[in-house]
Structure formats: C-alpha cells, structure tokens
Amino acid sequence: MIVFYDFLLTLAGGLLVTGIVLVASKIVANRLTLLRWKRLSKGLPIFPEKSLLGNHISTMGLGFENCRKIAEAHENLGPYIGGMLGNNFCMSTIDLDLVKRVVIDEANLHLDRQHLNLPVNEFEESIMLVPGHEWKPLRRVYAPALKSNKFKTPNVIHEIEDSITKLIGHIERRLIKAESDTVKENTKFKVDDFVHRYSLDLVFSCFYKQYQLIDFDSEKCMWTSSIDLMLDQIPVNPMVKFSMIFPWFSSVVDWVVYHFHPLGFSRRKVVEFVKLQTKLGIEARRQPKGDESSTLLKDGTKYRRNMIDHIIDAFLDGKLTQKEYLNTTCFLMAAADKTASDCIVHTIYLLSINQDIQERLRESIKVEGADSEYLAWVLNESLRLLPPAPIGCSRTNSYPIELDNGHVVPTGTFVVTCAYAIHRLKKYWGEDANDFKPERWRDTSHHHPMQYIPFGAGSRACPGREFALFQMKMLFAALLTRYKFEGTEREDAYTFTSPALIYVVPNSPTFVTIKRLEDEV
Ligand code: HEM
C-alpha cells in the first residue's frame, strides 16, 4: 500500500514538475521569439494583449471578439502589428499594397498557410494546409471541378432546387402549425438552425451523394449539431487551447481528443462518414458510365453525376493520393457548409432589420430573378460586413520583406489579413463603412484590388466562390418571392463574434419572424 502511495506521489510530483517546466519553457520561448521579432522586424509594434502563456495573436486566436480586437488594435497601432501564432511569427496588416504583394504579385513565393494551426489533423494534407509545392497538383484537380461549367448543369441545379424545396417545405409546415397555435411566437424561426440544415443538405448531395440524411423537421439534427458543437468548442476547449499553445503536442492531443473526448466523438462521426461516402462514390464511379448525366447503379437507383465526380475521376486516374483525396474531401465539408450557411444567416438577419432594402430586393428579384444585380450587391455587402472566413486569406512569407518605413517583415511570418478589419476601413469604404448599404456596389471602379477579400485573392483564392454565390442567389430568389423576414436589431447590429478567428458568427441565436407574402396582402 505504501509503495502504491509512493508511486502516486512520485507520479503527481513528476506531472507537476513537467507542467511547471512546460509553462516556464513556453514563457521563455515566447519572450525569446518576441525579442527576435523585434530585432528582425526592426521595431514593428506588437499586439498589446498579453496573457501568461503566449501573447497577442496566439491567445487572441482562442477568444471570441478577435476580429473586433484586431480592427481596434490597427486603429491604435497602425497598419502592421506583430505577435505570435503558436511559436511562429505572425503579423496582422491592413496595408493593402503589402497584402497585394504577398497574395497576388509574389503569390508563387508566399504560398503557405501552414501556420494557420487548425487543430484538426484531417485537414493536414488537404488543399488548405499542404505546403506550397504540394498544393499545385491538388489545386489543378479541385479548382476546375468547382468551375461554373461543372455546376451549371441540370444535375447540380437539381440538387440545389431539391435542398431549397426541402427548406421551403419545412417553413410551410412550421407556418401551418403556427396558424393553429395561439402562441404568436411560433412564427419566429431560429434561422441559424434551419439554414445550417439547408446548407449541409446541399453539401451532402453535391459532394457525398447523400440525399436523405438531413431531417429538417426534427427537434435536433445530429449532423448540424455535431458540427456546431465542434466549432463552439474550439475557442473554449482546454485541450484545443493546450494544443494551440503547445503546438509540439498538437498531434498527440489531437489523437486523444479524437478518440476519447466528446468533441472528438462528433468529429469522428463526420470523418467516418466522409471516408465511407468517398469509398462508395469511388465504387459507384467504377460502374459502367452510361450517359454523362446519370448512370443506373446495380441497385437500380440513379447515380447523378455532379462536381465530386470530376474529383473522383482524377483520383481514379492517379492524380491524387488516397490521403490527399480523403482529407481534401473532408475539408470541402468545412469549406462549403458553414461558410455559406453563415453568409445566408447574416443576410437574412440584415434584410430582416432593413425592410426598405428587403422590399427593393424583392422587387428586383421579381423582374430579374436570381440574376438580379441588386441581389449580387446585397450578398457582397453582407460578405463585406460579416465575412464568414475572416482570416482565410493569409500567407507565410518566404523571404524578408522590407517596408517603406524601414521596418521589415521577417521570413516565416504568417501574414494575417483580417477581412473583417479590412472591410471596415473608412479610408476605402467611407465614413459609413459600418452600415449595411448595398448601393455602395453600384460603382467599384475606384476599389483597391485587396479591399474586398471575403473569398481571399490570388492563385489560392477560394475555388468554391462561384458555386457558393450561385446557390445562395437561387435560395434568396426562392425565399424572397414567398416570404417576408422581420427581425429586431441586435444591440450592436453588424458586429458578431469571431470564435478563434475561424468564423464570424452571431453572439446568440438569430430569431426572425417569417410571414407569407400572400398573407400580407
Ligand atoms: C460563402 C462561402 C465561402 C466563403 C466566404 C469562402 C471563403 C474562403 C476563403 C477566405 C478562402 C481562403 C482563400 C485565400 O487564401 O486566398 C477559401 C479557400 C477555399 N475554399 Fe472557400 N469559401 C466559401 C465557400 C466555399 C465552397 C462552397 C467551397 C467548395 C465547394 C470552398 C472551397 C474552398 C477550398 C478548397 C479552399 C482552399 C483553396 C486553396 O488553398 O487552393 N469554399 N475559401
């Protein structure tokens, strides 16, 4: 017994000492990195926010109000602010000429996003995170598969219409139920929830050929709530924080979380699903092709050829390794689902508190349909104020960049461009930069090429942009000719939180009242 207690005491002591050594070494490493940064950058300012472990961007990245903090820090400290992300140099900048140089003019030299540190192993070898030279072959496969000539086909349009029809069916059933209820509140919809179901339903059909997984009417949808749980947890989960602060352990922590933590449980479900679907997709593609638009499978069901088939073809032709294919296909779920879903939620919210704009949009859609120019302006404006992937367009520079003022951006700095901050710069957008004003898109001839970057820019810009806009336009054209959205303004109308700098999301669920237009007359 005594031996056992001795063992426990030794173990506890060992763990305590290891903990102290880790924390101490982290503090020392941080200080040293910052000293190096100051020396190499020749005195560029540093983020003011400090905490015991790590400082500045690395800790800011784990909080909630990050984008706003970055915007405020630039107002006080100027266009370049240094800091750290994990153990790496990091710099946030709103100097658009510098951003253009890194992202467009010298794109081939500064391709990497490795320091993004997304705490999910599955993304490691995906198109998002592979290092520069390994990225090109992946891009050559994925970007053409997402081009408009691949998705403006009857099959893909059919998938989009299907998801819209399911969503409208859900709204109708809710409205019919509300008519028989005495409680008026029932026409209030939790927009985040049903929009996410729509978005995932569309991703499932377009990328995984699954048509019946999302139940729009159930109290809780396992798929959307698993993804929401994962994202909600990232900024608060101690394991995730630990692996971001101590990136050396991130693989081990990630493995432990994946296998033993409830957070990992939801992730595992998603990953296993993707693995299975990609396998099934490949098997289906190996069947005789038949005509290009659809093939009859062994079980008699129709195999609708859509965007993912071009990617499967490339895999079967040996242009992608199994891991690249699997991880990128996993990443597509994150890239295509939550981004578009957030943009739709933001836009419905903005329309619900701006009735005049909503009415003008409806009139324009009645005449021009989904091709309405005003609809394009509304979406641009929503993506400007609330960019769903606020620091997506960030790169690691591969050699020191000298700035005009004598400062230097040292090699290996993760140059963060916070779209949220850039999209609100009064210098470019005017005094009303924080207002929702679709008309500002009437004339863009004076725009700086980098002042609007919700989909990033340059050779690594989002390849899903056209598809995302296309499906969102179809959705809004269908919704606005049927329904009216009414909402109340949040305290700080256009400022949402940005958990871990990954997404810009509402502070609390978005509730909007939906009314049928025909009932309004
Ligand atoms: C509103 C919706 C979307 C937004 C706001 C968005 C935003 C972004 C941003 C900011 C980037 C980084 C670009 C850069 O570094 O310059 C990115 C990359 C990417 N996005 Fe999107 N995206 C959206 C929808 C989609 C969709 C629908 C897909 C797929 C169908 C997709 C696939 C990708 C991929 C594969 C990359 C990595 C590209 C590369 O590294 O070569 N995205 N996205």
Image (tube, rainbow, N blue to C red):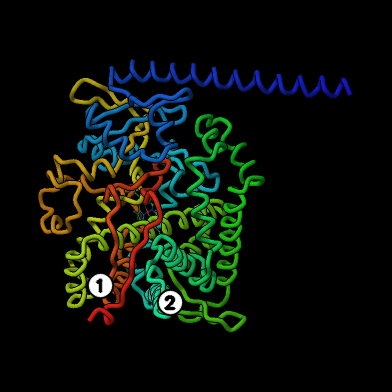
Q: Is mark 2 within 8 Å of ligand 1?
A: no
Q: Does the CB distance between marks 2 and 1 fall below 8 Å?
A: no
Element type where label 2 sits in the image: loop
Q: Position of residue 148 (x, y in %)?
A: 32, 66
Element type where label 1 sits in the image: helix
Q: Residue furthest right?
A: 1
Q: Position of residue 65 (x, y in %)?
A: 36, 40
Task: List the residue tagged with mark 1.
Answer: 370
Q: Is residue 457 left or right of residue 299?
A: left
Q: Position of residue 233 (x, y in %)?
A: 51, 45
Does residue 211 sit above or below 453 in this rendering? below
Residue 51 position by quadrant:
top left
Distance (Cα) linking label 2 and label 1: 34 Å
Q: Which residue occupies 47% across, 70% down?
A: 205
Amino acid carrying label 1: it is Ala
Task: List the residue tagged with mark 2.
Answer: 181
Q: Nearer the viewer, residue 457 or 437?
A: 437
Q: Residue furthest bottom?
A: 300
Residue 513 position by quadrant:
bottom left
Q: Position of residue 447 (x, y in %)?
A: 14, 48
Q: Which residue occupies 25% across, 60% down?
A: 353
Q: Is residue 136 left or right of residue 379?
A: right
Q: Quadrant of the C terminus?
A: bottom left
